[in-house]
């Protein structure tokens, strides 16, 4: 929770973490994944709720969630009072391998926005943004801000800034621009020798321009003001 305290100390109203940040992604060994997952009424969620209330800050994060024995790729939004105000389940299937037929691994169906003191928020998790149908549904919501929670790495396991800048980032920006909302792109960061996720958060205008970003592999609290211009 050090980043929560750091964000609160800098006067931030909300702090956002990436996909599966408090659980990791599934191994597809159900018993193992069940142990790694969190539940909305479990000790990890209670600790995050307490941190939100104690620091008077909103917290958004991703985790593999155990919901009645079923596992979801979920984004949780807690208010500055420590209340769970919204939960979004990843709709696309890309977090699971094609061979995974275990019925306990679930994807979501609903795509909704939520009203906050800062505007209307909508959410997508990783591969959701590349699905035309999901993107259209997000656009129809007309959110003020889209939060993009990611767990991205390169096959090489490297923090490949050149590949990101020249190949992948422009495509992500094109897809996000299709929603028509300002966006926060938050990718989980891990060490290269571990999960290889490369971080690289971005603040993106409604027109798809990057207003603020951090280099891949850089542990950073990227702070911005709202409303976001452009």
Image (cartoon, rainbow, N blue to C red):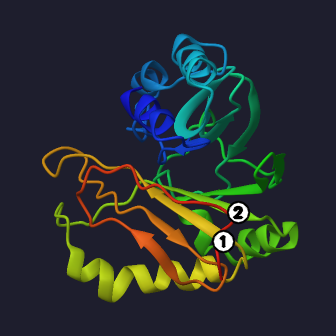
Question: Which element is circle 1 on?
Answer: strand
Disc number placed over residue 182 in the picture, else none: 1
Question: Which element is circle 2 on?
Answer: strand
Q: Residue at x 56, y 86 (%)?
A: 174
Dividing the picture into quarters, in which one does residue 69 lie? top right
- Marks 2/1: CA–CA distance: 5 Å
Where's residue 212, x and y in %? Answer: 44, 71
Q: Are the residues at dot 2 and dot 1 in contact (C-beta closer than 8 Å)?
A: yes
* Sequence-earlier tag: 2 or 1: 2
Q: Nearer the viewer, residue 194 or 96?
A: 194
**Which residue is outermost to the left?**
193
Dividing the picture into quarters, in which one does residue 181 lie? bottom right
- Vertical relation: 107 (above or below) 214: above
Instruction: Identify the residue under disc 2.
Output: 145
Disc number placed over residue 69 in the picture, else none: none
Where's residue 208, x and y in %? Answer: 58, 83
Q: Residue at x 53, y 40 (%)?
A: 11
Q: Residue at x 42, y 41 (%)?
A: 25
Quadrant containing the N terminus is top left
């Amino acid at each position: 929770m050090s980043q929560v305290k750091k964000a609160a100390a800098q006067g931030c109203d909300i702090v956002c973490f990436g996909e599966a940040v408090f659980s990791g992604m599934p191994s597809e060994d159900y018993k193992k994944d069940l142990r790694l997952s969190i539940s909305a009424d479990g000790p990890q969620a209670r600790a995050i709720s307490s941190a939100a209330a104690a620091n008077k800050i909103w917290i958004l994060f991703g985790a593999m969630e155990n919901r009645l024995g079923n596992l979801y790729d979920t984004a949780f939004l807690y208010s500055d009072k420590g209340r769970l105000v919204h939960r979004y389940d990843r709709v696309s299937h890309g977090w699971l391998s094609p061979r995974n037929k275990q019925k306990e691994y679930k994807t979501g169906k609903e795509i909704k926005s939520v009203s906050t003191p800062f505007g209307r928020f909508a959410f997508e998790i990783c591969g959701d943004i590349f699905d035309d149908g999901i993107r259209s549904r997000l656009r129809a919501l007309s959110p003020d801000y889209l939060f993009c929670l990611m767990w991205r790495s390169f096959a090489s396991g490297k923090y490949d800034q050149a590949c990101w800048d020249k190949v992948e980032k422009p495509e992500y920006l094109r897809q996000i621009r299709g929603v028509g909302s300002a966006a926060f792109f938050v990718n989980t960061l891990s060490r290269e020798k571990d999960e290889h996720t490369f971080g690289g958060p971005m603040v993106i205008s409604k027109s798809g321009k990057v207003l603020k970003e951090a280099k891949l592999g850089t542990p950073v609290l990227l702070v911005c003001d709202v409303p976001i211009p452009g």
